[in-house]
Image: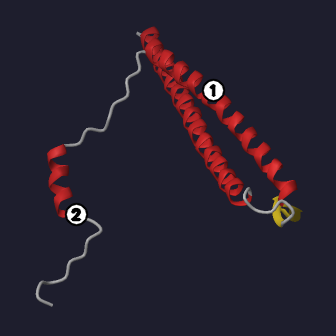
Amino acid sequence: MASRTGGDGKEAINEQVIANTYANMRTEMNQLYTKITELEMEVSEHSLVIGAIEPLDPSRRCYRMIGGVLVERTIKEVLPAVKRNKEGLEEVIARMHKALERKKKEITEFELKYKIRIRKADNDTEDEGGKKEGTAQGVLVGPAGQ
């Protein structure tokens, strides 16, 4: 009997280790998604800056933040640097997308190996439907005739 309870305890520990490993893998994947989104926003900002200063006179003054210090430069000096930064960000995003695909594949293999299934929180949809009707948002209507 004592060996059996010890075996159950070890199996529970293994299940816990597997669950923790899986949770860590999912967390890493979510962090990759977050970082990719953040970098894509930066690329978008770089594109806006390039679009705004490209048609201007190259000798015109502009200001650029470098390491927390605002410096005065000309558009001719700043534009190539902003374009290089944008290209660098795009390369990093491409590498992160590859890392994300590897992580997704790793998670899928882990799920198949340990037969992991994600349970979705299934609430009674009929009850939710009734609640949604009574909780319309965004419209305020006053009494008729005023």
Residue depth check, mark 1 versus mark 2: number of the one nearer the observer: 1
Closer to the camera, 95 or 114?
Answer: 95
Closer to the camera, 78 or 115?
Answer: 78
How many discs appear? Answer: 2
**Cα–Cα gap, marks 1 and 2:** 42 Å
Residue 45 occupies which quadrant of the picture?
A: bottom right
Q: Which mark is residue 135?
A: 2
Q: Which residue is painted at 65% across and 44% down in the image?
A: 39
Q: Is residue 40 left or right of residue 114?
A: right
Residue 121 occupies which quadrant of the picture?
A: top left
Q: Which residue is mark 1?
A: 99
Expressed as whole percent of the image width and height from the top left, the position of residue 53 reads 74, 59
Q: The residue tagged with tag 1: helix, strand or loop?
A: helix
Three-letter code, disc 2: Thr
Q: Which mark is residue 144?
A: none
Q: Which residue is painted at 20% across and 77% down in the image?
A: 141
Three-letter code, disc 1: Ala
Indicate whether 115 appears above or below 98: above
Give the crowd class for mark 1: few <14, some 14-19, many >=20 residues within 10 Å. some
Expressed as whole percent of the image width and height from the top left, the position of residue 108 reads 48, 19
Closer to the camera, 73 or 35?
Answer: 73
Pick whichever of labels 1 and 2 is earlier in the sequence: 1
Closer to the camera, 52 or 140?
Answer: 52
Q: Which residue is painted at 86% across and 56% down in the image?
A: 76
Q: Is residue 96 visible?
A: yes
